[in-house]
Image (cartoon, grey):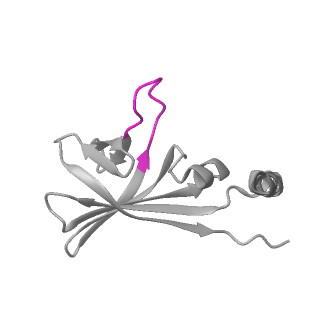
Amino acid sequence: MKRALVLVMLSAGITPLTACHGGIGTITETYVNQTNTRQVLEFSTKETVKGFIGRELINTDGHYVFHQGQSVIEGTYSRPDEHGEPRPFIINVGANAELRLWEINRGSLRDESGTVWKLQTRSHKLRSVLF
């Protein structure tokens, strides 16, 4: 009961601050290609209270970094609401090109070619709130 009360009080304190200042920080998830471990994909987005508590990426858009050996590609991604369907990560890789990945279970993604990407790390960088 005490724990629930503390969580409610924390949420009540954090929610107004984050609503006014655009999020409580940043969440970054790093995935590794299971067939070619030299390929690493990082997704970063603004952290939400709901995402922080549920430990997952909730926002519908963000930034990605793709590492393949020494090569690095950066850009944006989106996660549109698919109306009951699983929400894909849609990575913008060029002017008219995109790559889609779907969550197949907590901690794994599968791309359009069937390659599995395994969650390696999840990190939260909380924003300090100074008045």
User: Where is 87 relative to 75, above or below?
Assistant: above
Residues rendered magenta in the picture: 77-88
Asked if residue 78 lies left or right of residue 69, the reply is: right
Which residue is rendered at x = 27% and y = 64% of the image? 40
Give 104 or 61, whichever is nearer the viewer: 104
Please identify the residue farthest to the left as the structure is shown.
Answer: 35
Please identify the residue farthest to the bottom as the structure is shown.
Answer: 70
Which residue is rendered at x = 13% and y = 57% of the image? 35
Where is residue 52 drawn, in percent x and y?
60, 55
Image quarter where the C terminus lies is bottom right
Q: Is residue 82 magenta?
A: yes
Where is residue 84 drawn, in percent x and y?
46, 24
- Dominant secondary structure (helix, strand or loop) of the stretch shown in magenta: loop
Which residue is rendered at x = 21% and y = 39% of the image? 112
Q: Quadrant of residue 26?
A: bottom right
User: Where is 78 relative to 52, above or below?
Assistant: above
Asked if residue 64 lies left or right of residue 50, the reply is: left
Q: Is residue 94 magenta?
A: no
Asked if residue 116 lies left or right of residue 95, the reply is: left
Where is residue 115 drawn, in percent x and y?
18, 48
User: Where is 96 relative to 37, above or below?
Assistant: above
